[in-house]
Image (cartoon, rainbow, N blue to C red):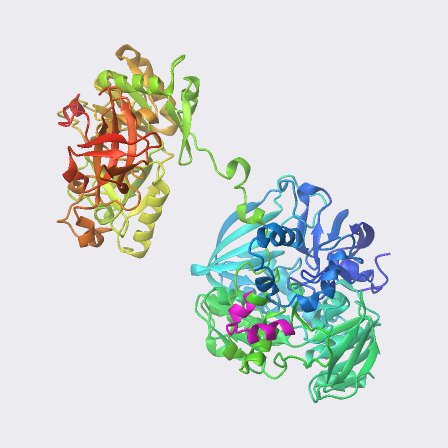
Amino acid sequence: MTGLFRAPAGGRSDRSRTVTFTFDSRTYTGFAGDTLAAALLAHGVHLVGRSFKYHRPRGIMAAGSEEPNALVRVGGTEPYATPNLRATQVEIREGLVAESQNRFPSLRFDFGAFNDVLAPFLPAGFYYKTFMWPIWGWHRWYEPAIRAMAGLGRPPTAPDADHYAQIYAHCDVLVVGAGPAGLAAALGAAQTGARVILCDEGAEPGGSLLDANPATQEGRETLRYHAETLATLADMPGVKILARTTAFGMFAQNFVALCERVTDHLVQPGPDAPRERLWQVRARRVVLATGAIERPAVFPGNDRPGIMLAGAARSYLRRYAVRPGSVAVLVTNNDAAYGVALELAEAGVKIAVIADSRPAANGALPQAVRAAGLQVLTGHTVQQTSGRLRVKTVSLAPTGGGAARRFGCDLLLMSAGYTPSVHLFSQARGALRFDTALGAFVPEGETDAVRTAGACRGVFGVAQAIRDGSEAGLMAAGTGTAAARMAPGAGAYAAASETPQTTRARAFVDFQNDVTTKDLALAVREGFVSVEHVKRYTTVGMATDQGKTSNINALGLVAQARGTTLPEAGLTTFRMPYTPVTFGTLAGPARGALFDPVRQTPLHDWAVTQGAVFEDVSLWKRARYFPAAGETMAQAVARECLAVRHQAGIFDASTLGKIEVVGPDAAVFLERMYVNGFRKLAPGRTRYGVLLREDGFVLDDGVIGRLAADRFHVTTTTGGAPRVLSMMEDYLQTEWPDLRVWLTSTTEEWAVIAVQGPRARDIIAPLVEGIDLSPASLPHMSMREGRMCGTDLRLFRVSFSGELGFELNVPSGHARRVWDAVWERGQGYGLVPYGTETMHVLRAEKGYIIVGQETDGTATPDDVGLSWAVNRTKGDFVGKRSLARPAMALDTRKQLVGLLTDDPATVLEEGAQIVDHQAPTCSLGHVTSSYFSAALGHSIALAMLAGGRGRHGHAFAVPMPGGAIPVKVVDPVFYDQAGARLNG
């Protein structure tokens, strides 16, 4: 049996496929296509969970993502277990294991329900007052207890065994929601030739069309329209339909995030299929056809299992052929709910009574209900309900006061109007206005980029939504007219209002967080006027449903408590995600080894064979030094430094960032970005470039070579490549879009082999083809293109060591062959490999800075001795105006200096402070780099010192735990100050 409450025929589930699943260790059956909620209701199971605060019994209230109560944990084995899934969205599959949450020891008998007894002592904000005393009690008593009780579902303890995918997509029109308006919008846009993506969170696109009654002519026409439209869209080559896909966030420039549930409904998904897929869509136009959410009524005892939204009951009946109960009472304030009563009655559900809070109900549907012999009480509302684990009786009383009448039932349906789903429109910075007739906020106007259609803009009814959606789709495609749009509907749905409480029972507004009408009134009495403050004080709308069913009711109650109107009370912020999204979807493949990817150069394996010791530099693994047998790091670095100074060294510099800047305006662009001038730089020459932020502080540096009149090879620091390219793209697209320039990251394309030392030219000369390496033809800071070892070569004559130096830029795929050739030839010249530690010592001996080490985000070019690089005669460049501020030129600013210790063997600690002997508690600067120089036989240090250039020769101290270390301020260039060794 698939359930006593299952109709013998009907529904959209596949009755030929019976599915067995378990809920709380009990076995049930359903049909393929059922949701977990539908399958449980078919067996008469309404109790599915416990509320967060009071652990009150809660049942299935809705049929979609707005469900606040039916949160379950799905997955039998730990690696695949997922908590807090909505039973209304979980599709059953063979062997599915689900369990209720937030209860102990069982769902029917929960110790946590004792909180319900203490409810009078646990009002809104009680924790702000209760846990203030004693002061030491928070960490000793309160926090451990609260943490033990916090949360809803039990989190998995094992790593997630599923995998997730991410994809980027572009389209002309993205339609969110595949109800009547969404389908019509997609069809209208697609018929113009536009590329369309249509997404819907349901397993089957269709929205309210799926709730049509096939027994009526109107219902048959609705279902026919649904089938024919979907078939037409599926056959159109420019249309992509995504079911089980939620648009959970809208960002700038129509960038929309979609979460597609790919395999959760499958018994045996393919091994390569992801569980979920994140779609990152950039759309030229977006049509939001997100529908409306039925509002629950606010009355005492409105949270018992068996109390359900009227529209949800219709969905379960039409989509799954499930009768949610045997005897029903309907409470409403609008005509639409009367149709639900008729359909349930035709399906065999006894309608005990319909209570309408309006003084009169004379529309076509109320008249049809009376004609069918159903009892209607106008001007009545709920006074009280009873039933511990499921509603048993409902007491109805006149809204103006009077005697109550009690009715027995196992199903209470409620409908307090509809709230247009404007979450995404609001996230797109769309303005909202309050529609008094609808009692809800609706979009205030539209933009060319984002349009709304159907119920989400207050246009109700299938025919009206189809017409409205079609016009929205045509407008999004650029062919429709605003004059054809329909105005939002009016009069059919009443505004939200609080039902008078004639008993001491509580009326719930936020079902998941147990926020009552009394909590909201208390928050206002305690001075919380802003709805945002009320939200945080009471936690209303802060549950996993993001206030979908509670928001408008809460705002109405706050307005009532303040004695103002609902629009004057204001509106809370609609934050993403629309529905919860797994961390796996957001992370995608970025997990395990890919969470923080390790990048290796093409020459990494060679360094491994040579016994290199590696260090992490940004995302790269770099060889730090190459120890010989028995050598310490200090000994290895000293040997490598002396080899470079006296013979030659070879260094892997492939990690340097590289950007190709190409276009007729490339030189103009670089002049505006960097402090240097580039328009007069001749092809074949290079220049050291300094890049600033807008505030005038150094961001990055590197050598820039001009390959041709319209082409530059720009290098950056190892860690700076992404931010430099991003900054360049930002300025090119937002500040100077008129410049004809194209940027390409080539970091991975070129490997860089640095050969440094007096014998460098002798080593590489026989291997280089087509380039004259003589000093006259290839002077320092020049470059040439040629061939080397049968591959392309960009040869830079530059040095970061102060010695004669060449940087061989070769395609990464050929780097090992070139390296091996240089290494083999260099053996006759004393060539040694050296690593980053030696590179640091060599550059510090020459006073060369490293961005991020000598600079800390507050250093100007002048501070670090680079004022010579700033071309102040050219036009504007990034940071120029900031450099003109008087504070940027003060003599008291920290400036780059060198430090020498009295004891040649004492190496200062990097980051150590510098003080005056007379005022040892006042820091004047700090050490930025410190090493022992084998070439000088003395320790050296670079430092940033206040007024440093005017203090050469002065003595200071570096305080350390073992005592102050005397230091002397010197020029930051320690070795070969004349620069003669650059020419070998």
Viewer can see residue 458: no
Give percent across and percent down for residue 338.
73, 79
Q: Quadrant of residue 819?
A: top left
Q: Compared with residue 912, is residue 396 higher up or lower down, i.e. above or below?
A: below
Q: Is residue 145 magenta?
A: no
Image quarter in which the N terminus is found: bottom right
Q: Which residues are magenta?
A: 517-536
Residue at image position (77%, 48%) is 94
Give percent across and percent down for residue 247.
55, 59
Residue at image position (65%, 39%) is 271
Front-most of residues 710 and 746: 746
Residue at image position (80%, 86%) is 371
Q: Is residue 535 magenta?
A: yes
Q: Quadrant of residue 905?
A: top left
Residue at image position (61%, 74%) is 553
Front-most of residues 664 and 914: 914
Front-most of residues 84 and 400: 400
Judge left or right: residue 694 versus residue 145. left
Front-most of residues 950 and 963: 963
Give percent across and percent down for residue 75.
71, 47
Q: Residue furthest top?
A: 828
Viewer can see residue 653: yes
